[in-house]
Structures are given as C-alpha cells and as structure tokens.
Amino acid sequence: MKTEWSGRTVTPGSAPTRIAILGASGQIGLALLRRLGRQPQLDVTGICRSTLSATRVVQAGGEVLVPSASSPAELARCLANFDLVVNCALPSQGPAGNARANEALAQALAGVGPATSVLHLSSVAVYGNAFVAGITSFKRPCPEDRYGREKLSMERRLRQLAGERGVRLWICRLGHVWGPELNWSRILLTLAADPDFRLPFDGMKPSNAIYIDNLAAAVGELARRRPRPQTWNLLDDPQRSWRELLDLHGQAAGRLPVASMPAAESAARYAQLNQGRGRGLAARLVVDLGLWLKSLPSSLIASSPALQALAETALARTKSDELESRLKALYWRAVARQRLHGVSPPGPLACMASDAVPGPSLEYSGAALGVDLIALATYADALSQPLASPVPCHP
Amino acid sequence: MTLRGIEKKAVGLIGAGDVVELFHLPALAGLSGVRVAWTCDRDRARAARVARAWGIPASYARLDECSDVDAVLVATPVGTRGELVTEALGRGWHCFCEKPFAASLAEHAQLVEEARRRQRLLGAAYLRRFYWSTRLARRLVEAGCFGRLQGVIISGTAPLKKTGVGPTSYRNDARASGGGVLAETGCHAIDQALYIANARRLGVADCVQVTELGLEIETRALGWLELPRAERVPFSLTLSGISEVYDGVVLDCECGQLRLHDDPRADVEVLTHAEDPVRFANPRAAENLAMAAFGDEWLHFAEALEGAPDLHSEGWEYEAETGRLTSEMIEQCYRLGSRRATAAGAGR
C-alpha cells in the first residue's frame, strides 16, 4: 500500500527524512521545497516567519509552519522535530538588524539538539565578486561586500555554536543559483536581450554557478548520506562558463548569442577591481580615505568601499539601530541634497570576471538531468511578454 | 528644488516606518521650503529614534499631543488611516497620504469631502506619476502619436519572494493592508495606467482572485476604461504574488504598443508594425529615480501648499490628486473577486 502526498510516493514502513526549510518563501527556499518534495523518502515542510510569506508556500502546494516562536530557544524546539533543517533564511535589514537576526538564527539552529542535522546555505560571495586566484582562499575567504561579509560571519558563528553544542552542521557555499524564477536567470535573460551587452572575457571565465535542480539533487543526497560535518562549495559539476550560461538563456528567450568583449578590453576594464584586495582593512582604508578626501564634498561614506565596510562592520558589531539610523540619515541627506545617488553595487558583471572559487566542492550524483529549457523559456516569456491584449468587454 | 516662499512650511510625519525613513525624509530634506516639525508613531521609541537621526525637534506617540503644523504626511497602513486623516484635517492641516489612499471607495469619498469642506489640500503618494517614462507615455498617448488608444494592459509581480516581513507587520493583516497585494502593491501600476490613459471612468467586468490564509495574493481582472472623449477601451489586469509575470504597463495603440517597465530607470519601448521597436531612452537612467520621484511628488505637493492661501484650495483636483479611480478599480476587483469566490464555495 502506498500513500500519496504532493505527487510523491512514500512507502509505509520506511520513515521518510523530515526536512524543514527555513526561509521557505524566498526564491531558493521555495524552489528547493518544490523539488525536494518530489524526491522519494523526503518529507518537506517550509518554515516561514509571517503569514504573508507562508501564502506563497501554501500556493506552491507545500506544507508550511509559521512558528509563534518569540525566542531562539522556542524556534529551536520547533526545529528539533525534524531530521534536517536547511537554512535558506536571509535577513534583509540594515547591518545592525541583520547582525541581530543572524545571531538569533544561529542560536536557534545550534539549539536543535544532536538528533537534528543542520545544512546552512552560505554563498560563494564570501570569496568576493570578482577575484583572481590567490587573493582569497577557501580557509581565509575575503569578501568584498556586506552580503559576503554577513554570510561569512554567519558561517563562523554557526560553526562555533554547533561545535560547542554537538550539532551536526554542514555548510554549503552556494554558487550563483540559476533556473526558472530565480534572480540570476532573470539577470541573464535581461543581458541576453540587451543588444549593447558585451560578454567580458568572451564568457570564458567559470561561472561559479549552480542550476537549481542540481542544488536540490545535492541537498537530497546529503539528507540521505549524512556525511560528517564539513564545509564545501556547491557548484554545477562540471562547471559551466559564462558563455554557456548566457547561450542557454539566450536560447530559452529565442535570442542570438551575445557579442563578446575582447580579452584585452576585458582585462583593462576589470584591472582595478582587485586593487587593494588581500590587504588588511586598515591598509585599504588609508588608500580609500585619501581618495575620499579628494572627492569631498560630492560624496560621503559611500565613495570609500573600505570606509563603508568599516562602518558596516562597526554597526554589525554594536548592533545599534540608533547609530545606523543616524548614518543612514547622513547619507540620504547628502543624496537628496546633491541628487547624487550613491554607489552602485558591484553587480552581476563583476562576477563575470572571477576565477573559479577555491576549495573542495560537494560531490553529488543524480544531477545528469540536463537543463529544463522549456521551463526556462516559459519563464523568459512570462518576464518579457504581457498577457495578450484585453478583449473588449464594454457594458 | 526650491520653493518661492520665504517662510518654511512645517510638516509633521504621522507614522515613522521604513518608507518614511528611507524615502520621505530624504525627499523632504531636499526641499528648501519645508521643515519637518515632528514625528508621530504609536511606537514612541521608533518615532524618537527617527527624529534624533534626522535632527527633528519633537516626537510623539499620539496625534493629540502634536503641535500645530501646516501639513502632515500620513504614512500608516491604509486600514488605520481614515481616522487619522479626518483628525488631521479637523486640526486644519493639509494631508499628504501614502498609497493606497483609502481602504474603500466610501472612505475615499468621505475623506475628499472632508478636505473640501475644510478647504485643505489632500494628496496621495502615487509615485509612478512622477516617473519620466510615465510622463512621456502620457504625452505620447494624449497627442495620439501612435494612433488611437485601443486597450491597456496592467501587469505586475508582487514582491513576495523576499518579504522581509515579520509576524507583527500590518502586511499580514488583510484589513490593515487594504485586502492584499492588489491594494498594497497593485495600486501603483493601476494608478500609473489610469494616469497615462487619462481615464475618466471605469468598470470591472470580471475578476478572479486567489486568497490564502486570509490574504489576497493574486488578482486577474478585465474591464473597460472611459477616455476623455467618452470612448471606451478594454483593459486587463494581472497582479500576482505567486508567479512572475510581466512587470509593467502596456498601452495598445493603433500603430504601436507602448511598453513601460515598472523600473523608473527603464526606457519607453514602442513595438510598431515595422521591424524594429522604437526606443525612447531614459535620459535620467543613471539616477536613483525612485528617490527622485519621491522628491518630485513632494515638490508638487509643497508647491500647491505654498500656493494655497488659508481657507482657499479651489483648483486642487481632489479626485485626481488622490487617485479616486484607482480606489474604485481596487474596490470593484475585491467586490467581484469575493463574489466569485463565494459563488464557487457555494457550488462545492
């Protein structure tokens, strides 16, 4: 006798692995929940912190839990009912708020007890966005933006707490996750449709990316194999180049391959990206500060990446909303006064100049499924085409 | 960004949430003719923190404690706004409200009536009217550059992917948020489309909504818009928090289709019957245009404020300024959507 649930078959007698996905309404959380829910012997529940987020999971046909937890200990008690907790949650407040939220999350995850394993999804952003091999390493990653720094500090805190409390912790530094309904694919589809876009280095650099189906396959396998606690990168295996990725997305959108930026031009344009990388923050600060002083008063903190990093680190450490508010006010006042609108983040193009991420990658099988080009094409179509023109329905 | 007057107008801020801190305050800081006198939020600590950060002299937790000002920004959830606006108008303050303007058409009419009676200005923060692309599209449609307008498509994805919304947020509450994503997010695209088309009346013929856990999370609707010369054109509306759809407004004209993406930096694209689309490049694409639009909407309101002598606000187009048709479309959608849902439930 078999029991059906969400299109998945569970055979009574062999208990399925109960998986909780924290942050299940996010782009990766929801995509994982859908895919893991189709794998045999996995019983997947989404964990959301608000009703609004939960609506997406319910609509996707998943089971969802909105814990009434008001403290990390309560959330930990809720998570302890599962065999595996996959952490896809990403706080989206300022540095101080994120530091507080990450600390609470780390406490909750480390409080699940020895019977529950934790898979923390980190990011290859811990290595930086555009780097040359040698500047950043697996053991001593060197992030260059707040996202990367927060991911790295969460890794470290979790590792420390899990070690102290005997929790089995796996950390996967995810490559750029792509596939239908994922931001990276949205970006690549936009670039594929842009006639002015030139692919740096002819797209020959490794993409450090992972297809969402491969991610789901790897997580499913991890849940079944339960290896010893470890940290890995998680990438497409074999790695795809940016050219391959762009061409795939171009095909899905019915576009011709994008043109290349010649290697010499690429090298010249990207040469400055790694200046100062690998130096200590203090050394970078001195350089940045000089440049910043020269540029006053047209720009403030935002014009010095090192100063910005220092401010963010300080805010994250002090967890002071007050200080953050004041800095924000200062910055925004300058923006409004000068109609100068900040420094744009490195963005996706910086990643296209990056070497392959260092260190070991998680090996997984079951990934030889190929790319679902039809799903990608449907996504491309949904983004680029409004529904058909309305039919007249006059009263 | 200067006003002609010498004396600065005093503005009070009712609600001290993110939209105030991240957008309205920077926009107000860029206006030389306005000073912010106080913040008021039921979370007294938050009101005080925002006030300190921005050098605002006072903060309050209750409206009746607040000192007199010329105008207020009402940036509390729409479901809590009616009473606050009425009270503010009662104290003789001009009111600029966050979107969506009102929780129902009846409330909308009541607030407009109250403002008219008291001869105070009343406006709504429908930001997209101040996008470069919106303004251009309105001129192109009005001038008939691509022939007669034949239909309007309003389409958007509600950002539920990364809500950042905690369990205590008003957005978890259908009543406080105005019903769901249609009111909370969709009102922007609806208002933008109605503004470009210069619609005078509308009717929703059919509407299907998806609701989950008490919140509306997807709306699909069809109907008609009446244009200035009384001709009617059909419209379709798709707003989804579940699946990703085209984000933007499309104006279907006789000789081409104008497409405006929801990104304020985007160009205006016109698909014609000829081979290549015509692209009007956004000359301000390098700026932070969301911030610029906040600045422009405040400038628009502040200039009216300066030009409005006491007890005289004739010439202020209350219905247009507050987006009455937007409220009407939202209300009709919710009414038809819930009727359909009830009928489907009864059928089961």
Image (cartoon, rainbow, N blue to C red):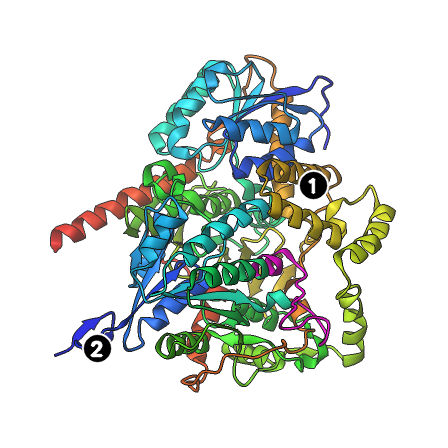
Could one spot residue B86 in this view of the protein? Answer: yes
Relative to B231, residue A326 above or below: above
Count of number-bearing discs: 2
Residue A235's mark? Answer: none
Q: Identify residue type, mark 2.
A: Ser
Could one spot residue B208 in this view of the protein? Answer: no
Q: Chain of mark 2?
A: A
Residue matched to label 2 = A14
Per the image, label 2 sits on a secondary structure element best described as: loop
Q: Which residues are magenta?
A: A128-151
Residue at image location 73% in from the left, 39% down from the top: A334
3D distance between C-alphas at marks 1 and 2: 58 Å
Per the image, label 1 sits on a secondary structure element best described as: helix
Residue situated in front as seen by the camera: B274 or A204: A204
Residue A331's mark? Answer: 1
- Mark 1 against mark 2, which lies toward the viewer? 2
Relative to B38, residue A387 above or below: below
Q: Position of residue B186 (x, y in %)?
A: 43, 47
Q: Is residue B56 magenta?
A: no
Q: Position of residue A237 (x, y in %)?
A: 52, 84
- The disc, 1 or 2, on the residue closer to the chain's N-terminal end is 2
Q: Position of residue A69 (x, y in %)?
A: 35, 47
Query: Quick one: quadrant of the N terminus of chain B?
Result: top right
Residue A110, picture quadrant:
bottom left
